[in-house]
Amino acid sequence: MTELSLDKLAIFGAPPRFGQKLHVGRPNVGDRERLMERIGDVLDSRWLTNAGPHVREFEERIAGFAGVEHCVATCNATVGLEVAARAAGLTGEVIVPSLTFIATAHALRWLGLTPVFCDVSAETHNIDPRRVEEKITPRTTAIVGVHLWGRPCDTGALEEISRRHGLKLMFDAAHAFGCSREGRVVGSFGDAEVFSFHATKFFNTLEGGAIVTDDSELATKARLMKNFGFSGYDQVTELGANGKMNEFSAAMGLTSLESLEEFVSTNYRNYERYRQELENTPGIHLTVYDGREKNNYQYVVLEVDEETAGVSRDDLVRVLWAENVLARRYFYPGCHRMEPYRSEDPNAGLTLPVTELLAGRLLILPTGTAVGPEEVSGICGILRAAVSNGPEIHRHLASAKPPTASE
Ligand code: T4K
C-alpha cells in the first residue's frame, strides 16, 4: 500500500482526491429497464396508490422474505413506527436508545408518548438490556430497540425483560432488512418490527417503509390506521393517518428486490476492502459483523480512538470532506442531546456515558454500488495518511478556518 505524503492532502492545498462527491447512502438502483416497464404498467393501469397491485405484491414479497405473516407497507419508516406504536396501543413512557436516527424518538413523541432514553452497549452499539430495567417506571408500556447498523439487538434478553414486566416490545429495523440473529431473519422479533426503504438504504423504494408482524390484530389495526381508518367505503372504524406506499415506490421495491444479492455482495466487497486496508491503522476500529449471520453490510462504521490515532474523529471528518468524501457522524450527538428531549423531563440533563463516547467517535464511510474498490482504497489512503501525521493535522486544522456548510 502506497502512503500519501501530507502535501497530497486537500487540507494542505492539494486538489481533492475525488472530483465527484462520495456520499454515505448514495442510492442503489436495480435493473432500469425492468423498473421502467413496471412504471409503464402503473401509468397504463391508472392505479397509482391506495393498495394497488404493486404494493400488494410488494407486501407479500416482504412478508415472505422476513418470515412473517403480515407486512403493511408504508410511505416511510417514521410513519411506520407511528402507526405500529399506535396499533400496539402504546401509552405513557417508551424505553429507547438515544444512539439512533432522530426519527425513532420523534415518531413516539409525535404520538404524545415519552421516549425514555437508555444507554447502549459499547460492543454492540445497541440498547443495553442491563440498563433497560433501571428505566422502567409504572408509566412504561414498551421497549423499542433499534438494530443499529443492521446488527440485531439482544432480542432474547429484551423479550425476557418485556415479558416479565408486561411490556410491548418493538424494533426499529430501519437498518436491518436482510439481517439475521441466531439464524432467524429480522422481521419476526417482538410484537412488530419496522423497516425503512428510504433512498439512502441499500434496498430502497425511493421513500418507504414496512411494518412486519405475526400479530394479526396489530396488523389489521395498522392496515386501517395507515389508510385514515377506512374499513370500507364510507366506513371509518379507527383513528387513522395517511401512511400509504404508492405504486411507483412499490415498483422500485420489487425491482430492487431482484438485485438484492448484488447490492449485498457489493457492500460486502467494499467492507472487506476497508477491513484489509485499515486493519493496522492505530486507533481506527472497523465495526465487525458476525460472519455466521446474514448481514447487509450497508454501513461501514469506524470507531476513532483519538488517543491512539493521534487525530480526532472530527478532524478526520474535515480531512475527508476536503477530499470530497462526505463521511457522516451518525448519530451525533445522540437524541437525548437534541430538542425537544434535552429540554424536557425525564431526559433533560440526562447523561448516557456510552452513547456520548460513541457519538464522539463514530465515523460512517461511503459504500454501496456507487463506490468501487478504487474509491475505497483512496479513502483508506487518506485515513492512513491522516493517522500517520495526526499531531500535524490536528495543529493545522486547529489554526484553519472551520469549514462552512457549502464547503
Ligand atoms: N430509524 C432509523 C434507525 C433510521 O436510520 C431512519 C432513517 C429512520 C428510522 C427513519 O426512516 P425513514 O422515515 O427515512 O424511512 C438519512 C435518511 O434520510 C434517513 O432515512 C436515514 N435513516 C438516515 C440514517 O440517513 P440524513 O439526514 O443523513 O439524509 P441526507 O439528506 O443528509 O442524505 C444522506 C446522504 O445521501 C447525503 O450525502 C446525500 C445522499 N443522497 C441522499 C438522497 C436522499 C443521495 O445521494 N441521493 C438521494 O436521493 O438522513
Image (cartoon, rainbow, N blue to C red):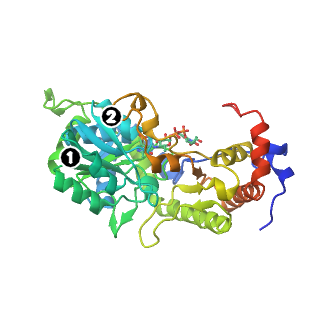
Where does the image place residue 46, in percent across and percent down from the top left?
Answer: 35, 35
The quarter of the image holding the C terminus is: top right
Residue 232 placement: quadrant? top left
Residue with the mark numbered 1: 219
Q: CA distance from mark 1 to mark 2?
A: 31 Å
Relative to 397, 223 lies left or right? left
Query: Is residue 48 in view from this perspective?
Result: no
Relative to 164, 393 lies left or right? right
Task: Looking at the picture, tell me which residue is in the foreground, 288 or 223.
Answer: 288
Residue with the mark numbered 2: 346
Mark 2 within 8 Å of ligand 1, using the beta carbon: no
Residue 379 placement: quadrant? bottom right
Q: Residues within 10 Å of mark 2 (few under 14, many from 20)?
A: some
Q: Residue at x 51, y 53 (%)?
A: 30
Where does the image place residue 73, in percent across and percent down from the top left?
Answer: 31, 44
Task: Looking at the picture, tell me which residue is in the foreground, 262 or 20.
Answer: 20
Numbered mark located on residue 14 in the image: none
For badge 1, the amino acid type reads Ala
For badge 2, the amino acid type reads Pro
